[in-house]
Amino acid sequence: MPVPATIDHRARSYSLAHAYWLARASDLSYKDEATIEGLARQWGFDQVRHHKTRFTPPFPLEDTQAFTMASDQMIITAFRGTEPAQIRDWLSDAGTPPWPGPAKTGYVHYGFAQALDSVFPSVKKTLEELRSNGQTLWFTGHSLGGALAMLAGARLYLEDPRLLADGVVTFGQPRTCDRLLAAACNKGFKQRLYRFVNNNDIVPQLPPEPAFTHVDTLRYIDSGGKIHESMSLLGGLTDRAKGLTADAFAPASDGIRDHLMRNYLAALEKNLS
């Protein structure tokens, strides 16, 4: 399957080709508004809305940013991530209290909940305005953006099951919630929720278990760049060790390097070509 030249606006379910375009959208979320609008229109989305809020400590990020782009067949909301070193610092802080999950289902990391709360009303209002033609709905994001994409999809669905998204696809997403909310997502989003993890990416290993956990559906990118639909515990450990030794001069940097969005895109392109 070649790398698709354009996004298929008729896609109604997960595919590797569609995941590639959602990765492109996740990458686009890091750009300025003019670049986002220009590329979105090139991709066939004639309406674009930006979501940006600023808030104060204790959450250590200055703002939350996302954008929504819509055509007459498809809507995508992509959440921006943050620097891996920064997200690692505050995800390692075990002192933050949990926050009740969507519709009081389980709990989530305090920082994620606060970040989503700051932008969710704008996202929901935009979706109500733009989803006028029964378009498919997709959430995506990288790093912190992946956590927010998952939580936005979960919140819409758990608060109103009629608003179930057609897909949530994330890249380098941290552990976001407890087992109760993860189970609700696994049940409600069967064959709709996918998270990509690139080899030794440090961010999906945080915050620590058992307080926080991941949803089930993993797409694991091995040290050679191949995507696997499943990976045994032993196989994963062996492959992660292989990734660490690939750079003999800076093995400790592997967890940061593997988190970079450009490396997720490169792996998707490699598997499609």
Image (cartoon, rainbow, N blue to C red):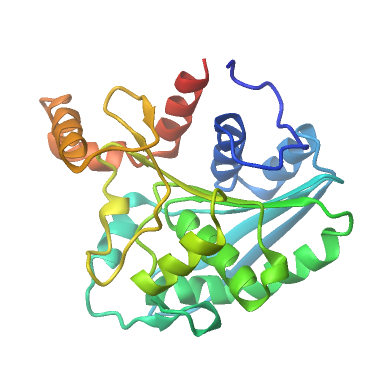
List x then y, in percent, for residue 59.
40, 75
Residue 178 visible in the shown view: no
Question: Is residue 141 left or right of 78 when viewed as pictured?
Answer: left
Question: Is residue 63 left or right of 134 when viewed as pictured?
Answer: left
Question: Is residue 150 left or right of 251 when viewed as pictured?
Answer: right
Residue at image x 72%, y 37%?
A: 11
Residue at image x 54%, y 39%?
A: 23
Question: Is residue 266 left or right of 73 when viewed as pictured?
Answer: left
List x then y, in percent, for residue 272.
52, 20
Residue at image x 42%, y 66%?
A: 183
From this view, report whether residue 53 is shown above or below residue 252.
below
List x then y, in percent, for residue 115.
50, 71
From this view, report whether residue 163 is shown above or below residue 215.
below
The quadrant in which residue 157 appears is bottom right
The quadrant in which residue 214 appears is bottom left
Of 13 and 36, which appears nearest the observer?
A: 13
Of 181 and 111, which appears nearest the observer?
A: 181
List x then y, in percent, for residue 168.
56, 52
Of 65 and 62, which appears nearest the observer?
A: 65
State how many labels appear.
Answer: 0
Instruction: Pick the quarter of the image with the N terminus.
Output: top right
